[in-house]
Image (cartoon, rainbow, N blue to C red):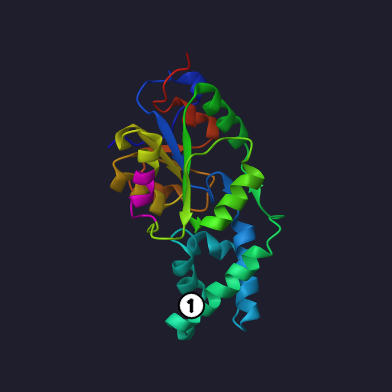
Amino acid sequence: MRFGIAKPASQLKVLKGYSAVLFDLDGTLLDTLREIAAATNQALQGLGYPSHPVSDYRRFVGQGVRRLARRVLPRSHRSDQDIECFLDALAAENRRCSHALTEIYPGIAELLTALERLGIPKAIVSNKPQTLIVECVDRFLGRWSFRPILGQGGDLPPKPDPAGALLAARQLAVPPEAVLFVGDSDVDMQTALAAGMSPAGVSWGFRSVEELQANGARYLIERPEQILSLGLPESG
């Protein structure tokens, strides 16, 4: 499998091959780490549990809220009842969230604008709860079109199960092998491979480059505009 750091678009001819881009959200398009840490710590403290440093959330997040609960709760308080109680508290904190600590990553706005100019369809597949992901996209990414936007809720299993990615591809009417899947974690790389898509790992996210490489990243992206060089069809 090819692996390497993508060259800037100005140095690499845009190739034909990928017809759509699927994005992860947290750690890929939006820097939400402080927001996630603040809401989760508030929920923990409200239940009488200790909180965690923001840096610890880099390894806590990525596989859905239930896995987050098991990682942040004390080992002696991880029963099904404890987890459900925590999830209720976290949902309440998320409803009160002002998103004041969330930021769009540098270069993402320019990338999304370029993809729209090229006519490349975009979708988001995240392990964030559906209501929260829609709220975040509307607030920070509402200038651009993402169809579909898939988060957690209902019967859709969390990544790395490929069901969400494959559903997005079907709704975009694009075969999986023509999809570039962009994310920042082992879970994203595993999802892309399981779905038969090309995994591209971003270096600015929550997890390390080494983790991305170990989990099958075909490309490593250092700057958002480099995504434009990865097999996307030319405009016109």
- Position of 52 relative to 207 (above/below): below
- Where's residue 87, x and y in %? 53, 72
Nearer to us in this view, 159 or 225: 159
Residue 204 position within the rendered picture, expressed as x and y whole percent measured from the top left: 54, 45
Q: Which residues are magenta?
A: 159-167
Q: Quadrant of residue 66?
A: bottom left
The residue at which mark 1 appears reads as: 83
The answer to whether residue 31 is seen in the rendering is: no
Q: Is residue 153 visible?
A: yes
- 232 is higher (above) or lower (below) than 79: above
Q: Magenta span has 178?
A: no
Image location (x, y in percent) of residue 153: 46, 60
Residue 161 is a magenta residue: yes
Residue with the most extreme bottom position: 76
Quarter of the image where one finds residue 78:
bottom left
Q: Residue at x 40, y 35 (%)?
A: 172
Position of the N terminus by quadrant: top left
In this view, which residue lies farthest toward the top? 236
Direction from residue 16 to residue 102 in the image, left or right: right
Residue at the image point whose x is 72% and y is 55% from the top: 100
- The image shows residue 195 at horizontal and vertical percentages of 30, 45
Please tell me which residue lies in front, 51 or 146: 146
Give the class, few, some or many, for how many residues have Cα within 10 Å of label 1's Cα (few <14, many ≥20).
some
Q: 132 and 225: which one is in front?
A: 132
